[in-house]
């Protein structure tokens, strides 16, 4: 399936050599992606004219596999969320909330095995049934608090400014943020983050950047505020 091939290709480029070393002979992430597709098909809910698919997946892993996955958990979760969204769009299904994936460790599960619980969990972000594929160019910034989504800012227009000034598109009351701290600009479907000469700088995945092309799951740190970029 194209979705699975794309998943393997993207994941391999994200974690490079770690992928082969970490997952050889154990549970492979593509098995989780396959299970997501299966659960979305089996767990769909039909309305009068629309179909809603599960958007929230909890995977229970063995301690050994859980330790391996932890080394690349951020990349894995981002790519598995993308699988959920791409499959829903391809099938014309809706999602009642944003795609979410969680890992839990269970001592009762053996190496190479896993359990999956799929559910429909409502959230601020929804994917309406029949969303055109072209909408994949849309994006959003999700403000995280204690690793959980607290607020979602949908990116619209050519550019979105982030800072303390009231006229910014994304206003954050963070003393570590500059008045006009950073900008996210849409360039033909690609989202480019640019620091606007801020005092404390802008970090992406823990690294200071002047500009950065955003990818699904990137963590943006401005002052003490952390945003996650999502295709939406």
Image: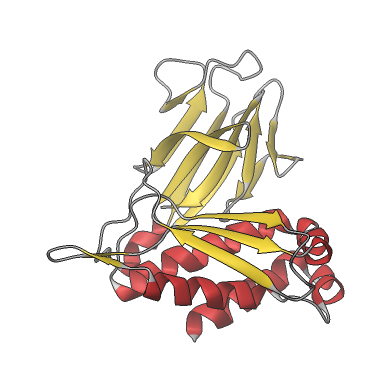
Question: Residue 95, image x and y in percent?
Answer: 34, 57
Residue 17's quadrant in the figure? bottom right
Residue sitting at the far bottom: 1
Write down the quadrant of residue 47 in the picture.
bottom left
Residue 1 placement, left or right of 70? left
Q: Is residue 224 left or right of residue 166?
A: right
Total marks placed: 0
Nearest the camera: 61 or 108?
A: 108
Instruction: In the rendered view, tell whether residue 134 sits above or below residue 128.
Output: below
Give how far across and how far down residue 171 sits, in percent: 46, 22
In the rendered view, how is the structure colored? secondary structure
Q: Residue at x 33, y 65 (%)?
A: 134
Of 84 and 60, the residue lying toward us: 60
x then y, percent, for residue 59: 62, 62
Camera-nearest residue between 183 and 9:
9
In percent of the image, x 51 and y 20: which residue is there? 172
From the viewer's perspective, tell me whether residue 196 is left or right of residue 22.
left
Q: Residue 121: x percent and y percent?
A: 40, 49
The correct choice, above or below, for 16 with respect to 182 in the image is: below
Residue name at image x 77 percent, y 56 percent: 70
Residue at the limit of the structure toward the right, as seen here = 21
Residue 46 is left or right of residue 24, and the answer is left
Outermost residue, left direction? 48
Q: Identify the residue shown where x is 57% and y is 66%.
A: 116
């Amino acid at each position: 399936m194209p979705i699975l091939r794309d998943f393997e290709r993207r994941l391999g480029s994200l974690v490079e050599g770690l992928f082969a070393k970490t997952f050889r002979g154990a549970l492979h992430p593509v098995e989780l992606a396959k299970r997501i597709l299966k659960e979305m098909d089996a767990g769909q809910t039909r309305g009068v004219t629309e179909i809603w698919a599960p958007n929230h997946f909890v995977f229970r892993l063995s301690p050994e596999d859980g330790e391996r996955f932890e080394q690349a958990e951020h990349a894995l979760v981002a790519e598995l969320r993308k699988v959920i969204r791409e499959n829903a769009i391809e099938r014309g299904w809706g999602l009642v909330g944003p795609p979410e994936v969680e890992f839990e460790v269970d001592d009762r599960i053996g190496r190479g095995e896993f359990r999956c619980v799929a559910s429909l969990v409502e959230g601020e972000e929804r994917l309406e049934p029949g969303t055109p594929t072209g909408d994949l160019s849309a994006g959003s910034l999700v403000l995280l608090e204690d690793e959980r989504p607290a607020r979602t800012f949908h990116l619209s227009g050519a550019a979105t400014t982030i800072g303390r000034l009231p006229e910014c598109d994304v206003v954050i009351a963070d003393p570590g943020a500059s008045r006009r701290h950073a900008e996210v600009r849409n360039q033909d479907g690609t989202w480019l983050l640019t620091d606007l000469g801020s005092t404390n700088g802008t970090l992406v995945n823990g690294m200071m950047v002047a500009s950065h092309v955003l990818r699904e799951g990137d963590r943006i740190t401005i002052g003490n505020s952390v945003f996650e970029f999502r295709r939406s």
